[in-house]
Amino acid sequence: MVQPGHFKADRVQWLQQRGVQVLAYLSLGEVEATDSTWANGVYSPEWNTRLVDLTSPVWRAQVQDQVMRQKGIFDGFFLDTLESAIDDPRQVRAMLKLVRLVRQWAGPKYLMANRGFELLRRLRGTINGVLIEAFSTTWADGYRPYTRQELTYTGELLKQAKRLKLDVYALDYADSPSQRRFAMRRALSLGVPTFVTNRELSLPKGYLPTTQTAPY
């Protein structure tokens, strides 16, 4: 997964020629806090973003423009911030409609959701794969492995994704060798490709085992 504005077409082609499946990042439910054009005013201090009014036809047009401009370059799209809508039934309906429209606009391109498990059952046949972010480790309250209860929870997410016949990938966060080993060993034991990096995603090669592959 890459930010489209940071990768020109020739760079994407360079990766594709080496067997890398390159997905364009696409945020469906949040925008940068400075972009108030489509925001509904709800501010997220953790990421310095604002929620989008998903019922806005102008926002749908903006997403359509992104998809249409990028689908000729990328192998698919990484759909982020799906869960921003889960507290409002009206916004949930609008998010479901938007994801289905992305499928229509993107055609056969690969679509991967970042979590969004509350919606995935209703999107069956629309999404190809899902990323379980923070599968075995987290940075949220300090870098650490999950507790047994938390591991059970993400294990249930994995089972749910498999029942929906989705491709499943994991993303983990670590700042020590022991945390990295823990995340990779658990993912390997469960048959899930994982990518282990830091919160800032500033380690382009991460700590991906050489025996595992995943869309870039």
Image (cartoon, grey):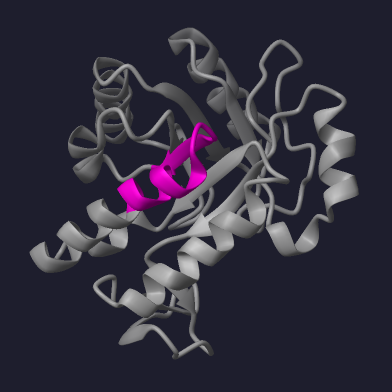
**Residue 133 seen in render:** no
Residue at (19% x, 66% y) in the render:
91
Is 108 contained in the magenta span?
yes
**Residue 182 seen in render:** yes
Residue at (44% x, 29% y) in the render:
129
Taking 139 as reference, is 164 left or right?
left
Q: Nearer the viewer, residue 137 or 123?
A: 123
Quadrant of the image containing the N terminus: top right
Taking 109 as reference, is 72 left or right?
right
Q: Where are the magenta residues, as a range?
A: 99-114
The answer to which quarter of the image holds residue 120 is top left
Residue at (43% x, 58% y) in the render:
141
Residue 61 image point, x, y percent: 43, 71
Q: Is residue 198 above or below residue 127?
A: below
Residue 157 image point, x, y percent: 28, 29
Residue 160 image point, x, y percent: 24, 24
Taking 44 as reference, is 121 left or right?
left
Residue at (79% x, 22% y) in the render:
19
Q: Is residue 187 above or below residue 207?
A: above
Residue 69 image point, x, y percent: 64, 59
Q: Nearer the viewer, residue 86 or 194?
A: 86
Quadrant of the image containing the C terminus: top right
The answer to which quarter of the image holds residue 16 is top right
Is 177 contained in the magenta span?
no
The answer to which quarter of the image holds residue 136 is top left
Q: Is residue 185 above or below residue 85?
A: above
Q: Is residue 23 above or below residue 21?
A: below
Taking 60 as reference, is 179 left or right?
right
